Amino acid sequence: MTDWIETSEAKAQNLSGFDTYLASHLIYKDEENLSWLCANLRIEAYKFFSDTITFNNFLEIKKNAIEFQKFIKSGGLITDPFAPKISPMRWRMMDHIRLENFKISTGLELLIKAIMAGEKLVIHEIDRTAQHAEQLRK
């Protein structure tokens, strides 16, 4: 004897849980679940962005970069002792540039997914053999 029964049999017996959705499928069931997904993706994106040196210290980094560009355009050399100093934030950013770029690109990916989901575009691969696949396609 098997430990499971077919979905159709569970539905016929009206057993609880026969209409359960996978988490990635449930968000397409109704507007409430879709709104929840969009909000959570935006929150996660914000967390990735707010954890970066680039976003937290953007004005300081920008100011330093503008000073440096002006100095170079005026004929200054990087080796000049009077060259503007690179800000500590810029050094920290350069020390962890791969991690910075990873966080920013992940945050952008989550934000784009939130926007796409908000426009009712499917952002997950839905198994065509899943129990509710036909209903989710609507």
Image (spheres, rainbow, N blue to C red):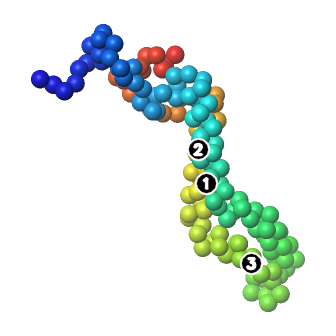
Q: Residue at x 58, y 69 (%)?
A: 96
**23 displayed left or right of 50:** left
> Which residue is the extreme one toward the bottom?
81
Residue topped by disc 2: 110
Q: Residue at x 57, y 51 (%)?
A: 106
Judge whether residue 73 can be spotted in this image.
Answer: no
Q: From mark 3 to mark 2, how far is it between C-alphas?
A: 32 Å
Relative vertical location of residue 63 with respect to residue 120 in this rendering, above or below: below
Crowd rating for badge 3 (residues with CA inside 10 Å; few <14, some 14–19, many 20+)? few
Q: Position of residue 89 (x, y in %)?
A: 71, 72
Whole-angstrom CA distance, mark 1 to mark 3, is: 25 Å
Q: Where is residue 56 in the image (x, y as percent from the top left)?
A: 72, 62
Apparent side of residue 128 relative to residue 6 in the rendered image (left or right): right
Q: Name the residue under label 1.
A: 48
Query: Badge 2, how many Cα within 10 Å: few under 14, some, many 20+?
Result: many
Q: Do the residues labelled 1 and 3 touch (CB within 8 Å)?
A: no
| Image x and y of residue 48, in percent | 61, 54
Of mark 3 and mark 2, the one earlier in the sequence is: 3
Local secondary structure at mark 3: loop
Q: Which of marks 1 and 3 is nearer the N terminus?
A: 1
Give whichever of discs 1 and 2 has the lower sequence position.
Answer: 1
Q: Residue at x 22, y 24 (%)?
A: 4
Q: Which mark is residue 76?
A: none
Q: Residue 86 carries which label?
A: 3
